[in-house]
Amino acid sequence: MIRRDDDMGHRKAPATLTAAWIALGLAGATGQVHAAAGTPVVSAEGEELGSVALASSCPPGAHAQLERGLALLHHMNYVRAEEIFQAAGEADPECALAWWGVAMTAVHPLWPDTIPAEKLVAGRALLERAAGAAHRNERESAWIEALAAYYRGERAERERLASFEEGWAAVHATFPEDAEAAAFHALSLLATADVSDKGYALQIAAGEILETVLERVPSHPGAHHYTIHAYDVPELAERALPVVRRYGDLAPENTHALHMTSHIYTRLGMWPESIEFNRRAAAASEDRVAGGHVSLHHFHAYDYLAYAHLQRADDEAAGEVLEAVRALEPPFQDHSATAYAIAAVPARMALERHDWERAAALELERPDAVAWDQYPYLEAIPAFARALGGARTGRPAEAEAAIAELARLQQAAAALDVAYDWGVQVAIQKRAAESWLAFESGDVEGALAMAREAAQMEATTEKNPVTPGEVLPAAELYGDMLLAAERPGEALAAYRAALVRSPNRLNSLYGAARAAELAGDREAAEGFYRKLLEVCPEPTGEHPELERAREVVG
């Protein structure tokens, strides 16, 4: 039970702690200091949100709202956080961090979007108001300046994020005991990490900073959330497991917190866990958000859920997710996570099952649901399906038309002002589709060269957090082609590479098993077949690959 000292749920800091903040120079202009090292935060609706360590110069009523807004900000519940920070400003118009918070909710460092022009204008005005607010101290001024660095000037998103990182690095260096600044510094490092750096230097640095935050505040929502993002790559994913197993309990009703655990479960091929937490996340996001819109988090959970069911060979459950997506009534939050689920879930149903007829006929569903011109890389998903489907069903003209569409969408994606290079992702899809068109036309060597190129391009990138994985990985498609070209030894190597990037994928496991079997490696074949049966213990639908696995392993 949380003790409440006022009707806003704020807990007063012990005198010794307040004195410690004052010693650090964190006293506010008003003489009031409100601080908490790990203060538990509960929403107005009673939702547990974890603990934050926030000192502010604002009076108790506004400070309690700041804590709630900050916790929601760390959970990336930006719409709700904006409302709470706005309420803090209404409670105390001179509360600098309230207006900082409203401006901060418009910045989404790890999301594949960019700040709209009107938000830039509004954010600058909010930060000017924050900088002139009476209830502000030196540290709070540093927070305002760190965010102002992002908003300053007319620049590309990558440049804004670089300034964001520099700003928070300076705050962290000046106030090393400020756990919240440390968390934001780690977030900024992740926002500027180079996906081609396979040493993951910035991700590891961010993870180390977040470890220190967790030492001070064990239930800190940002430290949990950002740690998952830091280690959301195959080589680092196991490092996040202890944090993942705590995050769902830390905020058991928060949709994004529940879903975030599945990022690591997906990276490690832990499908039952991914299914459990995405089910819970979808249930937690059933209520519509502000304006009566279906939440982007609802769609996001559904995409990950469908992906996990398909890897378990549970076609019935995946089909139920697809129907649930189709049954949702607009309005929807216009966001890439919404658009991704709408585009990807139907495509996954066809492509994961190599249902090439279905893939060849795939069109973008709900064409008016979101502003698709913002998401050409997502319009590319059904075009990719049509290109593969046309090539694999002997319809070269249809495949060529879809590939031409991919070329157009690639240019549009490359021109987007976002930190993530979606143009490369569409280029990989285009090259993979071209390779299968060439293969089906009889140019085996040329096709293999193109498929290998697509796989190599994919290996230099990382998937974006908006997706659990590629709708069909290029490395897996390369293995499929090598197997079709009767080169099982090379195919086995390609499938092994695919499984390093995406463990326990059904198609890659079966491909590796079949390739090993044809190459005469009985031991490896049995190992992959056994793993396949372990991953898919209760299949639904027709799965001849599982029948073959049972035949081989008895």
Image: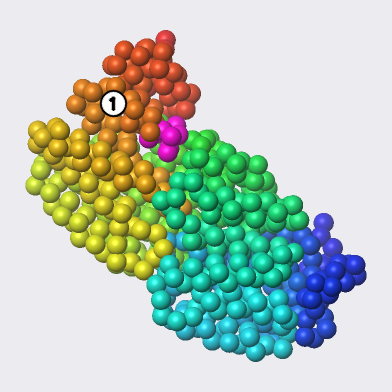
- The amino acid on which the numbered mark 1 sits, given as a three-letter code, is Glu
Q: Which residues are magenta?
A: 498-505
Residue 75 x, y percent position in the rendering: 60, 60
Is 536 left or right of 182, judged from the image as shown? left
Q: Residues within 10 Å of mark 1 (few under 14, many from 20)?
A: some
Q: Which residue is mark 1?
A: 490
Residue at the extreme right of the image, as rendered: 15
Outermost residue toward the top in this view = 554
The percent coordinates of residue 174 (x first, y second) are: 69, 70
Q: Which residue lies at the image location 29% right of the left edge and 22% below the top edge?
A: 489
Give the position of the N terminus as an image quadrant.
bottom right
Question: Does 98 sit above or below residue 216?
Answer: below
The image quarter containing residue 134 is: bottom right
Q: Position of residue 539 (x, y in %)?
A: 42, 27
In magenta segment, residue 375? no
Question: Is residue 323 visible from the viewing direction of this image?
Answer: no
Q: Position of residue 220 (x, y in %)?
A: 69, 57
Q: At x 77% / y 85%, what residue is drawn?
A: 29
Q: Nearer the viewer, residue 280 or 222?
A: 222
Label 1 sits on a secondary structure element that is helix
